[in-house]
């Protein structure tokens, strides 16, 4: 289903943006400054129309402020980050919490949703859509939230804000677990990562198409957006074979993905603008740290060198 005709959202180049640099992270509460975020957005603004932000925190506050004050031509998908409301004993990296922590998380989640609504109403010309969470229902998540809770959050957002509302999740839960949520959201948002599923570059785009159409064909009356798709450039072998990732392979997948999305009229957010060294373990080559189209010190990787300097 067409986003333009149903929700008046034009397809365009889109990217996920997290501006945390060396020594900064949402976990430590050390956030990028106004000038650092301005630097990032000036790098991005001639190449991408849409940005996706994950959390209603100080980082998002500053991003929205920079866009408004510097009069940058971005449209933002703003998300609320919802934390675990149930234990997920199947999570390999720790999805269990005390009952007190789960209660605290629920209270924080509600505050996140309330802030999401507040920001949506404060920046109606910048924020074009809203997400009730990110990867919180998939089997392996460490911040598991019951589908009923997500549905309630979507309803709260729709009651308080005018922008279209979604929920960002791996494509698999949409095929069954999230059927009830489909009725509530204005559009479906899927994540597709062929390289995490052991696909090589020759299989990658076809696998992405399979993932997309498995959901889009199941719900023909609901628009589907890809809110994360990308290719890592390094791996220590944890989950991704090192020979399956490089800047050369990232360039191939990125270009194939963007060209197909443009031809098909699909809004696709490339993951991710900049490398994120704060993620995952202390292993420097852990894949989680290396999805950026730019390094953490804002140097363009191969795919961006080609775009920037041609």
Image (spheres, rainbow, N blue to C red):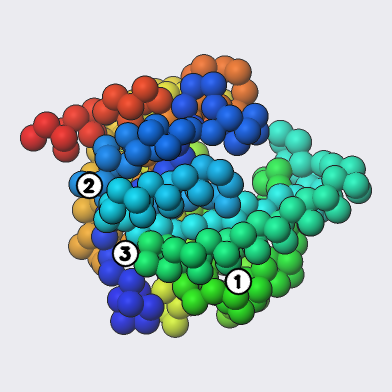
Q: Earlier in the sequence, mark 2 or mark 1?
A: 2
What kind of element bears circle 3? loop
Tell me if mark 3 has few (under 14), some (14-19) or many (20+) residues whose alpha carbon lies within 10 angstroms of its own: many
What number is the disc on residue 129?
A: none
Q: Tell me, yes or no, if residue 309 can be seen here.
A: yes
Q: Which residue is under mark 1?
A: 157
Q: CA distance from mark 3 to mark 2?
A: 17 Å
Furthest residue toward right: 99
Image point (82%, 41%), residue name: 96
- Which numbered disc flags the more N-terminal residue, 1 or 3? 1
- Residue 122: x and y in percent read 49, 65
Find the residue positioned furthest to the front: 69
When asked about the image quadrant of residue 131, the answer is bottom right
User: Can you say whether 174 is above or below 198 in the image?
Assistant: below
Mark pair 2, 1: CA separation? 30 Å
Residue 39: where, in percent of width, then height? 32, 34
Instruction: Provide the secondary structure element on which disc 1 rests.
Output: helix
- Work out whether residue 193 or residue 206 is closer to the camera in this orientation and state it: 193
Quadrant of the drawing holding the N terminus: bottom left
The quarter of the picture where residue 43 lies is top left
Mark 3 and mark 2 residues within 8 Å of each other at the beta carbon: no
Q: Which is more N-terminal, label 2 or label 3?
A: 2
Q: Quadrant of the C terminus?
A: top left
| Left or right, residue 144 beside residue 56 | right
Q: Is residue 170 shown left or right of residue 309? A: right
Q: Which residue is mark 3?
A: 266
Residue that appears at 54% across and 21% down: 23
Which residue: 28% across, 53% down?
Answer: 71
Distance from disc 1 to disc 3, alpha carbons, whole Å, reads 24 Å
Residue furthest toward the left? 310
Pinpoint residue 157: horizontal percent, then vertical percent: 60, 71
Label 2: which secondary element = loop
């Amino acid at each position: 289903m067409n986003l333009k005709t149903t929700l008046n959202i034009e397809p365009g180049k889109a990217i996920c943006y997290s501006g945390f640099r060396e020594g900064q992270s949402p976990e430590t509460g050390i956030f990028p400054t106004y000038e650092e975020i301005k630097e990032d957005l000036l790098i991005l603004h001639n190449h991408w129309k849409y940005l996706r932000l994950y959390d209603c925190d100080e980082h998002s506050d500053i991003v929205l402020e920079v866009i408004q004050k510097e009069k940058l031509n971005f449209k933002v998908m703003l998300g609320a980050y919802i934390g675990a409301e149930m234990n997920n004993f199947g999570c390999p990296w720790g999805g269990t919490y005390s009952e007190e922590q789960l209660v605290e998380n629920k209270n924080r989640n509600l505050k996140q949703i309330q802030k999401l609504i507040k920001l949506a109403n404060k920046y109606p010309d910048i924020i074009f859509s809203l997400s009730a969470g990110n990867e919180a229902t998939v089997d392996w998540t460490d911040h598991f939230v019951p589908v009923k809770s997500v549905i309630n959050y979507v309803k709260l957002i729709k009651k308080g804000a005018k922008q279209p509302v979604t929920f960002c999740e791996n494509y698999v839960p949409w095929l069954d677990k999230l059927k009830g949520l489909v009725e509530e959201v204005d559009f479906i948002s899927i994540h597709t990562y062929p390289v995490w599923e052991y696909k090589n570059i020759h299989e990658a785009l076809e696998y992405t198409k399979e993932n997309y159409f498995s959901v889009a064909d199941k719900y023909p009356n609901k628009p589907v957006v890809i809110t994360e798709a990308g290719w890592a450039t390094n791996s220590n072998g944890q989950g991704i074979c090192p020979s399956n990732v490089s800047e050369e392979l990232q360039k191939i997948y990125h270009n194939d993905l963007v060209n197909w999305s443009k031809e098909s009229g699909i809004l696709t957010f490339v993951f991710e603008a900049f490398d994120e060294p704060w993620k995952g373990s202390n292993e420097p080559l852990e894949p989680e740290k290396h999805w950026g189209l730019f390094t953490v010190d804002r140097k363009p990787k191969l795919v961006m060198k080609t775009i920037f300097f041609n």
